[in-house]
């Protein structure tokens, strides 16, 4: 992965919430459907592997813009964890631009 161009998306701005840089702010690198993307988040508390049967469908109260980004809900150790739909983090225009840049890097 070294030397690869990876787009960075600030999820806080995507969800239209304040986005101050703090000591806890982190960048996570994700891969979804063969596309690698980095996302800026407020903080990362823990990284955990969770069995797929532990993921429940989002409740009906999750509607609108947020619903398209939420894949499921996980109850773990008394906490509720929101599982993001990583394939939705890039818009179709962003995905096309990224594929073009990655294609140039491979053939350049």
Image (tube, rainbow, N blue to C red):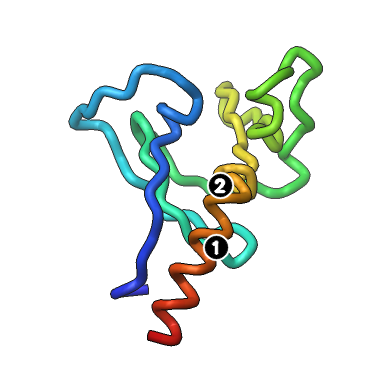
Q: Disc 1 designates what residue? A: 35
Name the secondary structure under disc 1: strand
Q: Which mark is residue 90?
A: 2
Measuring from the top left, give residue 97's x and y in whole percent: 50, 59
Q: Nearer the viewer, residue 12 or 72?
A: 12
Would residue 11 appear left or right of 93 to someone viewing this image? left
Name the secondary structure under disc 2: loop
Number of numbered markers? 2
Residue 67 occupies quadrant: top right
Crowding near the residue tagged with mark 2, few <14, some 14–19, many ≥20 C-alpha atoms within 10 Å: some
Would residue 8 appear left or right of 20 to someone viewing this image? right
Q: Nearer the viewer, residue 94 or 59?
A: 94
Residue 96 occupies quadrant: bottom right
Vertical relation: 58 (above or below) 83: above
Q: Which mark is residue 89?
A: none
Vertical relation: 49 (above or below) 5: above
Measuring from the top left, give residue 48's x and y in whole percent: 51, 46
Measuring from the top left, give residue 28's x and y in whole percent: 39, 48
Vertical relation: 22 (above or below) 108: above
Callout 1 touching callout 2 (CB < 8 Å): yes
Q: Nearer the viewer, residue 68 or 81?
A: 68
**Residue at 57%, 50% in the rendered image:** 93
For the C terminus, which image quadrant?
A: bottom left
Residue 85 occupies quadrant: top right
């Amino acid at each position: 992965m070294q030397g690869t161009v990876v787009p960075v998306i600030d999820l806080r701005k995507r969800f239209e919430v304040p986005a101050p840089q703090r000591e806890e702010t982190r960048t996570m690198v994700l891969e979804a459907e063969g596309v690698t993307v980095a996302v800026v988040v407020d903080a990362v508390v823990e990284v955990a592997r969770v069995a797929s049967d532990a993921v429940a469908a989002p409740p009906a109260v999750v509607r609108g813009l947020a619903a398209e980004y939420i894949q499921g809900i996980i109850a773990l150790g008394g906490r509720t964890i929101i599982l993001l739909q990583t394939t939705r983090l890039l818009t179709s225009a962003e995905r096309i631009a990224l594929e073009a840049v990655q294609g140039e890097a491979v053939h350049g």
